[in-house]
Amino acid sequence: MSVTGVVNWGVVIMGWIAGIVMLALFVMFIQDIFQKEHAVRRNFPVVGRLRYFLERQGDYFRQYFFANDRQEMPFNRAARSWVYRTSKNLGGIIGFGSTNDLREPGSLIFVNAPYAVLEDERKTAPPLVIGPHCERPFVASKIVNISGMSFGAVSAPAVRALARGAAEAGIWMNTGEGGLSPHHLEGGGDLIFQIGTAKYGVRDPEGRLSDARLREVAQHIRAFEIKLAQGAKPGRGGVLPAIKVTEEIAQIRGIPMGQPSDSPNRHPDIKNDDDLLDMIVRIRTVTGLPVGIKTVLGSDAAIRSLCEAIARRGMESAPDFITLDGGDGGSGAAPQVLADHVGLPLNEALPMLVDTLIESGLRERVRVIASGKLVTSAKVAWALCMGADFTVTARGFMFALGCIQSLQCHQNTCPTGITTPPRKINGHPQIMLRLYPTPFCATTFPTSLLWDTWHAMMGYLPQNLFCSAM
Ligand SMILES: Cc1cc2nc3c(=O)[nH]c(=O)nc-3n(C[C@H](O)[C@H](O)[C@H](O)COP(=O)(O)O)c2cc1C
């Protein structure tokens, strides 16, 4: 074909493209001036759409270009980068100086000792027993563990990576309220099974707690945790949007596929302290395993009332552990009003819980597990100083897997695949979390974090008191 022919074809194609673009803009224009949902689009047809597009892009790009190191919520860049580095074993060393303003009210400052403990004088923490009077007590050896994230809220590759990483690091993994999946079992490590208000995985066909299912599940796990509330949504049960309820998830939870998985906002069979203690004793008797509870506190009234009920009924009725979640905890999906405004943050609630247990003479009987933004060594060290026996983190391990905090866990659009099940289009995986290096990171993160925690505390506690759990 001659040059003129090529040019003519080019002009024709460009004309078609321009025509199609004009037509599309015209259709958008008509749509915008007649729609009644968005004032901006009605007043500024077509151009107004840019607002929504740019707002969406802000979620992704704000963290790179506009927010400073200590500004973002829920986790600022300094904390996230710290976890990324820690989980890749790149160390926690920074240059020039800290961007943390120590003069800010509430800033966390450890008192340094004039003569710190030498690194080679470090002692190994003895493992702690949870539920020593149970038929099968749980001996837990590490301070940092994986908090509950249900299969469904996080994807199968993520659960597998965490399960394998946890087993390798010798830490426990909490299943979250979505039941026990084969992916949890793949690692072969210690599991705590969480019983949510819908009792997924341990319910009978009518949705009631089933002793037979409890016994079956008990063969694979180390302890049960009854979830009363999690920090992000006290007074609201687990929520899994319909789009995330795949065939596998539906089967594991015992619910219909493709319909929202909405749990009751309270255990229907636990309406007071006595019901709760009855349930704890029942599960412990049926399974022989330690049984604890997970909650968030609003004041010390609830925990005082529970301690009084235990005193009345006898120590043996007490939960073997209490997992205390901060009101600013994370969630796969939660109503904003609850996430923003209900429940005390951990820095207020943890001393409240520990003090109440001490006053009630229950501190030795009930292990305290703290959670809520404990993703850096300083925060873990703080929780131990406040009286926690163990810490757990959910989002810390999500960061270790590569989470970029795009705040989309409740949708099916997680850019890293951690909260989005892998999909296949024409047989090809579209969003797939690669299994390497994630189990490595899930292993390295808690190990390096503990090492760093020791650094935070070695100048603070008397030499023979502090033990690292490396
Ligand atoms: C994706 C996701 C799923 C979660 N699923 C559960 C769950 O099933 N049960 C539960 O008790 N907590 C759940 N949580 C809350 C965490 O276990 C934890 O209590 C909370 O995020 C605070 O810890 P963090 O600040 O270390 O993330 C979930 C959190 C996230 C981010």
Image (spheres, helix red, strand yellow):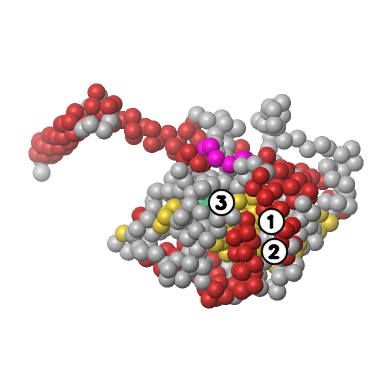
- Give the CA separation, mark 1 to mark 3: 19 Å
The residue under label 2 is 317
Element at badge 2? Answer: helix
**Foreground tag (2 vs 3):** 2
Element at badge 3? Answer: loop
The residue under label 3 is 229
The residue under label 1 is 309
User: Residue 70's quadrant in the figure?
Assistant: top right
**Foreground tag (1 vs 2):** 1
**Foreground tag (1 vs 3):** 1
Please indicate, yes or no, whether residue 231 appears anywhere in the rendered image.
Answer: yes
- Classify residue 375 as left or right of residue 4: right
Specify whether residue 343 is painted magenta.
yes
- Residue 410 in percent (x, y) is at 43, 48
User: Residue 211's quadrant in the figure?
Assistant: bottom right
Specify whether residue 283 is painted magenta.
no
- Residue 218 in percent (x, y) is at 59, 72
Q: Is residue 12 above or below residue 331?
A: above
Q: In this view, does 363 lie above or below 461?
A: below
Specify start and end residues of the magenta stretch as a single range: 340-346
**Which quarter of the figure is the N terminus placed in?**
top left
Please indicate, yes or no, whether residue 190 appears anywhere in the rendered image.
Answer: no
Of callouts 2 and 3, the N-terminal one = 3
Tell me which amino acid carries mark 2: Ser
Question: Which residue does the image show at 63% across and 59% down from the upper left?
Answer: 274
Question: Dot 2, how many residues are within 10 Å of its Cα: few (below 14), some (14-19), or many (20+)?
Answer: many
- Residue 317 in percent (x, y) is at 69, 63
Question: Dot 3, how many residues are within 10 Å of its Cα: few (below 14), some (14-19), or many (20+)?
Answer: many
Asked whether disc 1 touches disc 2, contact meaning CB atoms under 8 Å apart, the reply is yes
Question: Which residue does the image show at 55% across and 40% down from the upper left?
Answer: 342
